[in-house]
Image: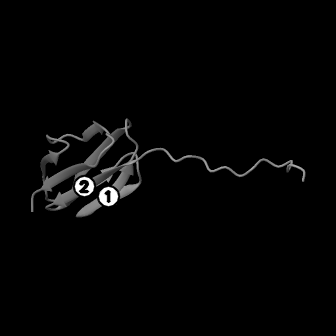
Amino acid sequence: MRASPWPSKRRCPLPPVAPLSVSVSGRGRVTLGTVPIDCGRTCTASVVPGKEVVLVAIPEPGATFLGWSGACSGILDCRFLAGSGATQVNAAFSR
């Protein structure tokens, strides 16, 4: 039997990913700059370990962003390097 002249089909290995969970309370939403998702109350995404993650808090009209908790803190955009494990971030807005 002759060997095929065509290369064999090989599956490309997928990069490792880690879960990111975002919870939102109050009147606002969160967007994830590197992945096209838009969080209402809760959402999850897969992020690549070692890559920067940027979350942006967007208050609804008349509401105020109160701050982050979990993997982020403060009131500016949430920026961190994704680790190899699960990450939880919470965003609080006024009601």
Looking at marks 1 and 2 on the same chain, the residue that comes earlier in the sequence is marked by 2
Tell me the residue that label 1 is attached to: 44
Residue 84 position, x and y percent, is: 33, 42
Residue 61 showing in the rendered view:
no
Q: Is residue 65 above or below residue 78?
A: below
Residue 3: horizontal and vertical position, in percent?
Answer: 86, 49
Residue 22 occupies quadrant: bottom left
Mark 2: amino acid: Val
Q: Secondary structure at mark 2?
A: strand
Q: Quadrant of the C terminus?
A: bottom left
Q: Check the image and tell me how it is coloured.
A: one colour
Alpha carbon distance from label 1 to label 2? 6 Å
Q: Nearer the viewer, residue 23 or 66?
A: 23
Residue at (27, 38) in percent of width and height: 79
Q: Is residue 3 visible?
A: yes
Amino acid type of the residue tagged 1 in the rendering: Thr
Q: Residue furthest front?
A: 1
Give how far across and how far down residue 71 sits, in percent.
20, 43
**Relative to 10, is 92 on the left or the right?**
left
Q: Residues within 10 Å of mark 1 (few under 14, many from 20)?
A: some
Among the 4 quarters of the image, the one containing residue 75: top left
- Number of callouts: 2
Q: Is residue 32 left or right of residue 67?
A: right
Circle 1/circle 2 CB separation < 8 Å: yes
| 8 lies above or below 53 | below
Q: Give the residue number, with chain letter if any, for mark 2.
A: 22
